[in-house]
Image (cartoon, rainbow, N blue to C red):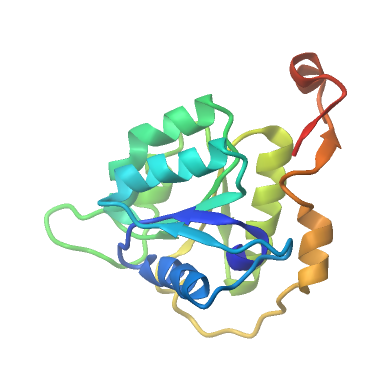
Amino acid sequence: METAGSEAAGAYPITPSTQMGEGWAMAVAQGATNVNGRRLLFFEPEGEHAAAGVTAGMSMTGLRSTNFSSGQGIAYMHESLYAAAGKRLTYVLNVAARAMTKHALNVHAGHDDYHAVDDTGFFQLFAKDVQAAADLNLIAHRIAELSLNPGIVAQDGFLTSHVIETMLMPERELVKEYLGDPSDMIESPTPAQRLVFGETRRR
């Protein structure tokens, strides 16, 4: 769903979220465009901390942005997430949730990474299956842009992130109608936003 609705991604590969970023990178290499006809952008920096900074920067320029990470990668970018929430950025972090490595390497499903960022200010959604992961991804972008708050969409690492299930992908026109264009002018949805931006603001 990200390649349909979003414009830009910053990510660093870490199991089990690696395939998410690889899927995005493949779409970029193939010259894919999103539902608004814009070519996708991708930047892979030297680590997850930098990836969070890259994604924040993309979001600050007005791009509908995303990131993909898991486990220790979430821990590494942790401090950057506070700044993203504090700056009222609107990107979505996709998490293939896994246990944190403790006395031995563990890349299997767990919610340690998901709960490690409870205090950052990101809103958090958790998908129970592949269909929910796709649907919640679109919902998260809409929530983020209306509330001016970044969000997390998580799914169980491997148990959901690597499973083959039947799902219904929303049509591109439906995605476009639901999310709108990031450059649209919209009515400010809350009194606080009207105070800051006036009656309308950029999505």
Give the quadrant of the C terminus: top right
Q: Residue at x 46, y 37 (%)?
A: 118
Residue 195: give x, y in percent of width and height: 79, 14
Which of the 4 quarters of the picture holds residue 101? bottom left
Which of the 4 quarters of the picture holds residue 151? top right
Q: Is residue 40 left or right of residue 119?
A: right
- Given residues 20 and 30, the one toward you in this image is 30
Residue reaching furthest to the top: 195
Q: Residue at x 58, y 62 (%)?
A: 127
Q: Does the image show residue 73?
A: yes
Residue 130 versus residue 96 in the image, above or below: below
Residue 200: give x, y in percent of width and height: 85, 28
Q: Is residue 23 left or right of residue 130?
A: left
Residue 99 versus residue 168 in the image, above or below: above
Give the quadrant of the N terminus: bottom right
Q: Residue at x 45, y 65 (%)?
A: 156
Q: Residue at x 57, y 65 (%)?
A: 128
Which of the 4 quarters of the picture holds residue 116? top left
Residue 111 versus residue 31 in the image, above or below: above
Figure disc tally: 0
Q: Does the image show residue 120?
A: no
Residue 72: give x, y in percent of width and height: 27, 51
- Given residues 157 and 103, the one toward you in this image is 157
Q: Is residue 127 left or right of residue 95?
A: right
Residue 26: give x, y in percent of width and height: 46, 75
